[in-house]
Amino acid sequence: MVTQQKKINAAKLAITKITSGMNIGLGTGSTTNELIKLLGDNPELKDKCRFACTSTQTELLAKNNSINIEEIDNFNYLDLTIDGADEIDHNGNMIKGGGGALLREKMIASISKNYIIIVDDTKYVDKLGNFPLPVEIVKFGPKSTITLLKNIFSEYDLYPEIKIRPNDDGSDFNTDGGNLVVDCYCTELNSLHEIKNKIESVPGVVTSGLFINMASSMILGESEKASEVLFK
């Protein structure tokens, strides 16, 4: 319950960043879910803003809270996207994709004027990497893609176990785009810009869960309050 309250506190501060008439991107994850529930109770915002979602999971929750969702192609830009993170460091760099929505999250972020990350304080870290790095890959030749990824990591003296993400029944997890996700258990990541660019240059890789220099600010939920940290 303590962690849940931290998420609620973050969501309560985040909703104050939304004003009537905005184009809003809604992210994926348990903290963003708390924001969606608050929006559902706020007719002034949910009826007078326009919304796009980063995943079918988020879209379903939004619709259950009577929030109308539009396709991303209906927007030239979004005023604000509010999303979560699996890890975020003191420079605003992130690992995302624990829920498997990393590609759509990047697409929504790319057309957003402001990109606010809402997390509880357990996600705020000195160094990225303790959370496994998700990489979205195509279904063709996944073992070959994994071998290429291991070669890249080895250039940085990293030798992670890399696993194709399973569903609970043991079948391969599929993203909303119909791709696979491999989780790279690195423990710690260095040279974030370089390693991101090299990973994303591998044939067969769609995108990585490294989100570098994208966040405008972070709203940090704690037990008693939430506060905002600006990055740019």
Image (cartoon, grey):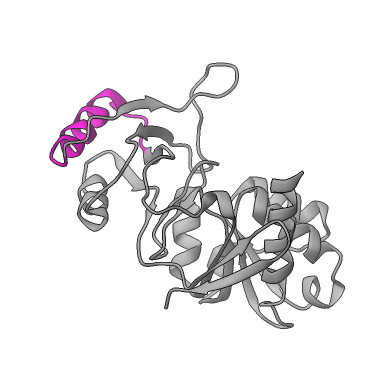
In the figure, is residue 133 to the left or right of 16? left
Residue 138 in the magenta stretch? The answer is: yes
In the figure, is residue 89 to the left or right of 173? left
Residue 34 in the magenta stretch? The answer is: no
Question: Residue, x 63% and y 47% (percent of image)?
Answer: 56
226 or 8: nearer the eye? Answer: 226
On screen, 65 above or below 232? Answer: above
The quarter of the image holding the N terminus is: top right
**Image coords of residue 197 (percent x, y):** 23, 53
| Residue 69 visible in image | no
On screen, 160 above or below 57? Answer: above
**Image coords of residue 135 (percent x, y):** 37, 40
Which quadrant holds residue 15? bottom right
In the figure, is residue 55 to the left or right of 1? left
| Residue 81 visible in image | yes
**Image coords of residue 129 (percent x, y):** 36, 43
Which quadrant holds residue 159? top left
85 or 91: nearer the eye? Answer: 91
Question: Residue, x 22% and y 41% (percent of image)?
Answer: 203
What residue occupies the far top of the structure in this picture? 170
Question: What predominant SS class does the magenta segment belong to?
Answer: helix
In the figure, is residue 228 to the left or right of 164? right
Question: Residue, x 42% and y 35% (percent of image)?
Answer: 181
**Image coords of residue 192 (percent x, y):** 27, 54
Q: How many marks?
A: 0
The quarter of the image holding the C terminus is: bottom left
On screen, 48 above or below 161? Answer: below
214 or 22: nearer the eye? Answer: 214
Question: Residue, x 79% and y 57% (percent of image)?
Answer: 37
The magenta segment is 137-156
